[in-house]
Amino acid sequence: MKKILCLIMILAAGKMPVAQTVPADTTVPGKVTINKDPRLDLLAKAQIDIANTNTKMAARFTKGYRLFVLKTDNRDYAMKVRAYLLQNFPEEKVIMSYQAPFIKMKFGDFVDKEDAEKVKKQITRDGVVKGGIYVVPDTIEVKPDKDAKEETK
């Protein structure tokens, strides 16, 4: 009985690899047609343009210095100081913010701390601002024309 059982198992094991053979592929190579909306190309181009713009925008902002000029609750005085700054330094920005009840004013985009100190001394010398003026680190906007001038030097 054991011999017959062994013989059946050997014969069955010999047939197993034959059961796993794969028949030949019957598919015929053909032509694939892709129908897509032409707006997808426009969308992809717009996405690339946005990515390029973001990298240019990131290059425009850097770490630098601004002057913290004023913190007051007197609007008329704040407008007087703002007018003075814009008249005497037209190439620099005046940033005003309101946090009740105070008006805060920052001034300029300075890459070097020494440049900020020079302007601070001039404003102090003119005596328009009653309180102290402080040089504070801030994220500033670098103007493209300033970069071009520095590269030519």
Image (cartoon, grey):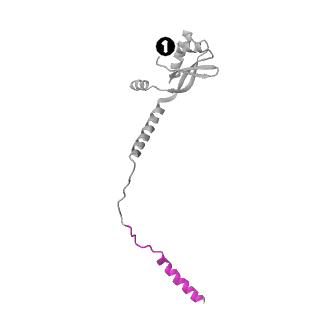
Residue with the most extreme top position = 126
Residue with the most extreme right position = 101
Residue 28 lies, with reference to residue 75, above or below; the image says: below
**Residue 150 percent across, percent down from the top left:** 42, 24
Over which residues does the magenta segment extend?
2-27
Asked whether 4 falls inside the magenta stretch, the response is yes
Q: Residue at x 56, y 25 (%)?
A: 137
Quadrant showing the C terminus:
top left
Q: Residue at x 36, y 56 (%)?
A: 33
Q: Residue at x 50, y 15 (%)?
A: 86
Quarter of the view holding residue 151: top left
Asked whether 16 falls inside the magenta stretch, the response is yes
Query: What secondary structure prevails in the magenta region?
Result: helix
**Residue 9 percent across, percent down from the top left:** 55, 83
Quadrant showing the N terminus:
bottom right
**Residue 72 percent across, percent down from the top left:** 62, 16
Camera-nearest residue between 83 and 68: 83
Q: Residue at x 59, y 15 (%)?
A: 75
Q: Which residue is mark 1?
A: 87
Residue 15 lies, with reference to residue 127, above or below; the image says: below
**Label 1 crowding class (10 Å Cα cut-off): few <14, some 14-19, many 20+?**
few
Give, as a three-letter code, the residue at label 1. Answer: Gln
Q: How many marks?
A: 1
**Residue 134 percent across, percent down from the top left:** 59, 19
- Secondary structure of the residue carrying numbered label 1: helix
